[in-house]
Amino acid sequence: VAHREGAVIAWLLATAHAADLVRARALAARLDGEVWVGVHFAIADGWHLYWENPGDSGMPTRFELEGAAAPPLFPGPHRFVLPGDVVNYGYEGEATVLFRGEPDEIDVTWLVCRSECVPGSAHLVVPDPRRSDRRAIRAARKALPDRLPVPADGVLALRVEPGTAVTVFPSVGAEEAVLVAAVEGRTLHFRADPASVLAEHGVVLQLAGPGGTRYVQLGPTMEPR
Amino acid sequence: MKYLLFALIALISPSWGSPVGSPAPDFTLVDTDGKQVTLSQLKGQIVVLEWFNPECPFVKFAHGSGPLSYLPGVWTDKGVKWIAINSGAPGQQGNGLDKNRTARSLWSMGYPVLLDETGEVGRLYDAKTTPQMVVIDKDGIIRYAGGLDNAPMGKTEGNAVIPHVQNALTAVMTGKAVEVPSSKPYGCSVKYGS
């Protein structure tokens, strides 16, 4: 009997552990006359969730919506380098993915990794936007990359703080292009070759300056479905 | 000068596993039964390398109900030599004789699982994920490197499934060019020690 109890406790602990790695909840608010819905993820210390392009390994965090909504808007990602120079794009701590529109329910599936990976999922019922998570939604909107017009020649020059470090996050389809970014003084230079890649397969740039980190986005990063 | 500077600072270009068209780097490893396997001794046979970790969710899917539950059997019946390689370091997920022996029997893998605990062979082939795949022709030339297919965990985002390894093997077997010789590997990271 003691044996069986031990096994049950071990199983309960393992299950609780898996559930604790990621906690997902739905948010909603009406801002500037438009309904925004968000999925907030709280991620256990040392673990990371994935951006829409997971990088060398991992799996994109995926959403299936019931009711009307535009594609997910991911916040600016971070870069994780695992042993063997395996590069991952994603989030640690917390992250909120946003949707414009009013889905009723959201099914979300994810893979959460540190060295090992654990798949997870949640079925979320979207709360009434009148109940309002305005502050959280507003903060999540701030964490979205700023969309810039796509340069037809693939070249971008952008004014930045001196000492800014730039990191390039290609969408899945942009990985085959040559993407070059560097900061010289107060200017960020970015170039995509072929230039045409940005029209369909976008790129997110992380600009980490002395005064804080911001993100810009060129082109659509979500692959057409 | 400006562009040179750019190139030095931050360049992203894809390199998906081993260079297709070049000779497959030779190696000798020991399988879970203690038997030595040397790649160069398999010349004259088509060889498939499959990076393996029995505890990776992608590998569990592929072997449990996905393509790796039937593809290796189909192709080994046609004379293809299929080899799994676990490049996980000691103490990492999926490492160790017991776990790999158990998985081999659980999934009825009729082919060897080689242990590469130093990660040397994994790095030689630039293996980043499990399951990452390499197809080598009878002359020892790499003809395909990359993902098993375009369907991680069986999901394709509404697109048709492209069975890359199946297609590559069909082409190599019939003496044709491999239409898609490389694709982005997907899955868990290979659990290298450092």
Image (cartoon, coloured by chain):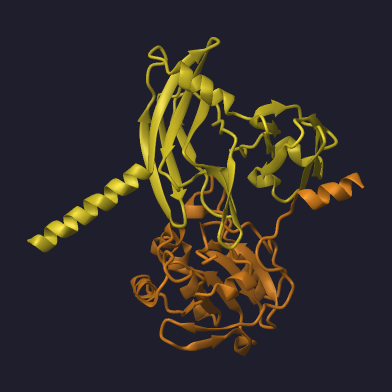
Chain colours: A yellow, B orange
In the rendered image, is residue B158 in sight?
Answer: no
Q: Quadrant of residue A159?
A: top right
Question: Would you place residue B45 above or below residue A148 in this image?
Answer: below
Q: Quadrant of residue A224?
A: top right
Q: Position of residue B194 (x, y in %)?
A: 55, 65
Q: Which residue corresponds to the image point at 37% horizontal and 74% vertical from the top-left?
A: B108
Considering depth in this image, is A27 or B66 the residue closer to the camera?
A27
Q: Position of residue B29 (x, y in %)?
A: 53, 83
Q: In the image, A177: left or right of A225?
A: right
Question: Would you place residue A120 above or below residue B149 in this image?
Answer: above
Considering depth in this image, is B48 or A172 the residue closer to the camera?
A172
Considering depth in this image, is A42 or B157 the residue closer to the camera?
A42
Question: Would you place residue A161 above or below residue B38 in this image?
Answer: above
Q: Position of residue A201 (x, y in %)?
A: 69, 40
Q: Which residue corresponds to the image point at 34% horizontal and 71% vertical from the top-left?
A: B106
Name the residue at the right extreme.
Answer: B1
